[in-house]
Each structure stands twice: as C-alpha cells, then as structure tokens.
Image: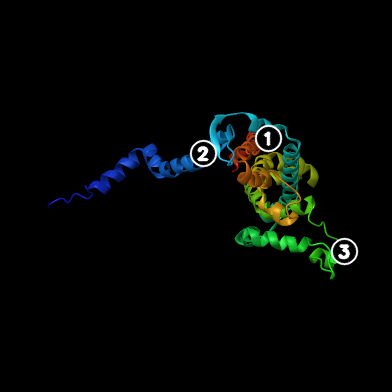
Amino acid sequence: MDVVTVGGGGAPARVSRFFRRHRKASLFATLGGPVAWMLLVYIGSLVVLVAAAFFKIDSNSKVTTDFTTANVKAAFTTGSFVDAIVRSVLIALAVTAVCFAIALPMAFYIAKVAKPRWRRSLIVAVLLPLWAGYLVKGYAWKSIFTPDAGKFAAHKGGGFLEATLGWTPGFGKLAIVITLAYLWLPYMVLPIYAGLERLPPSYLDAAGDLGARPFRTFRSVIMPILVPSIAAGSIFTFSLSLGDYITPRIISGGKEQMIGNLIDQLQQQNQALSAALTLWPIAIIIVYLLGMSRLHAFESV
C-alpha cells in the first residue's frame, strides 16, 4: 500500500511554520506596523509640537528657525497661565474624587452583590452613556444647569434643576466638575470592577470569621487589593479631565478657562507660545503616571 504524506509544502505553509517556531517574529509582524504608525504619528507629532515651543515667530505669526526660550519662560511664569494650570489640576482632581466616590459602591454592587445573571446587563448600563455623542451630552448638561434667566431677559427660563429643586450651580466650576464626572465615570467603574472580580470571596469570609466588622474588612482587606485598580481608573479620569477643553467651553461659555482652552485660543495667535503651554500638561501627566506606577496601576490597566 502506498503511503500518502499529509502536510504540505508551499509558501503559505512554510511561512506559517516559521512564525510558529519564532514567536518574537510573529509578534513583530502582527504589531510592528501599528506600533510604528503610532510612534510616527503620535510621538513624532508630539516631538514636533514641543520643538516648536523653542522658536520665535515672525510678524505673520509663523514659526521661524530662530531659537528662543522666551515662550517657555512666558508659559511657566505668566500669572494667568499659572492660574489656569492650578484651576485645571484642581478640577481634574475633583472629578477623579467624585468618580471614585460614585464608582466604588457601584462596582462593588455589580461584582459582589448583584446576581451573576444581571452583571453583564449592569456593565452594559455603565457603558451605555459612552454610546451617546460627546457634544450631545455636553449640551444636555448645559440645559440642566441653565440658571433662571428672569434677571437677564423679559421671560424666565431655567433648566431642570432650577425647575425641580429651585437651585442650580449655574455655569461655574461645580457644573464643569459634575459634567466631567458624568462623562468619565465608566473609566473609573471598570478598573475597580475588574479589581473586585479578582478579589477571592474567601478573603471576605475569613475576615467575617475573624470577627472583622464591615468597615474593618473594607479598610484592611478590600482597599489594599483595590489600590492598583483605583490608581488605574484615576489615570483615565485625571488625564481626560485635565486635557478637556470642549466641556468647559460648553458649560461655562468660556468664562472658566482651563489649560486646554488657552492652548486652543493661542493656536491661531501664537503657535510657539501655544506649544510651550503644552509642556504643562505633559509634565503634569508624566509626574502623575510616575506616582501611579508606584501604586502598580499599570498592572490593572
């Protein structure tokens, strides 16, 4: 009886066998193109942007080849710029704190209290706001915060809060914090939920058997395990809030300036100074990421 050799030759089979034997080559072939494109477009454009901060501009507001540090000095010493930076950082930290306060009980309920068959539906409900348009949500919150226009117009207006509660934060910092917290809340819920999913139920049972009260169990058992997840979620909420300039413009009408708004305004007037201002958020995010890395945040991202 003749023996038929199964398997083959051909270029596709040889290529497949080569990549099975060389895992690193397979990984490079899969991710090499996208990573190279990201480095070229994202990192490359960022380097060009930072370099533009060290050159003068001519009378037509065009960047020249004359080197200068005046733009960077102005970006880091001008009082109005520093005030905007402080305001932006405080708003970003407030948004992160609000998201954490809401996300922790929400994620705990989904992961440990809700019945397993409902967990997927609850996670979808958390993600559902992300499906709506960014601008739609921004203008919707603006209509909610609209103050009574009776003092400024012939007719009285007012938004949802004014009509139902008789009070509204108006178009100030509090309104910006609430809106940004709504926008980025899912990015805090998901990492905390993932961290709680990895928490063995036996830990909670052991704490209860040893007589630990709920608060002691939360402080001594749950929180130490959740710290990397909380840090990971804060990276998203803090960085997204710090760089957001559309929401402050929509909600406050441009009255509450954040660093993103200044960069956007100066882009048409003084590109070099606008580029110098970008050094602020870059430096802040780098410091923040270094701090979060010490809390093992990147293990949960």
Q: CA distance from mark 1 to mark 3?
A: 39 Å
> In front: 272, or 25?
272
Name the N-terminal-most of marks 2 and 1. 2
Q: Are marks 2 and 1 in contact (CB under 8 Å)?
A: no
What is the x, y in percent for residue 174?
Answer: 79, 52
Residue 50: image quadrant is: top right
Residue 294 visible in this rendered orientation of the protein? no
- Residue type highlighted by circle 3: Lys
**The C terminus appears in which quarter of the rendering?**
top right
**Label 3 packing within 10 angstroms: few (<14), some (14-19), many (20+):** few
Residue count near mark 2 (Cα–Cα under 10 Å), binned few <14, some 14–19, many ≥20 = few
Is disc 1 surrounded by few (<14), some (14 to 19) or many (20+) residues within 10 Å? Answer: many
Q: CA distance from mark 3 to mark 2?
A: 50 Å
* Of 134 and 68, the residue lying toward us: 68
Q: Amino acid at mark 1?
A: Ala
Query: Looking at this rendering, what residue extends furthest in the bottom direction?
Result: 155
Residue 51 falls in image quadrant: top right
Display coloring: rainbow
The residue tagged 2 is 43
> Is 3 drawn above or below residue 71 in the view shown?
below
Residue 252 in the image, given as x and y percentages of width and height: 75, 54
SS for dot 1: helix
Label 3 SS: helix
Callout 2 amino acid: Ile
288 left or right of 19 in image: right
Residue at image mark 1: 75
The picture places residue 2, in percent across and down from the top left corner, at 12, 52
Q: Earlier in the sequence, mark 3 or mark 2?
A: 2
Counting residues from the N terminus, which is met first, the one under dot 1 or under dot 3? 1
Q: Residue at x 59, y 39 (%)?
A: 59
The answer to whether residue 46 is above or below residue 264 is: above
What residue sits right under mark 3 in the picture?
A: 151
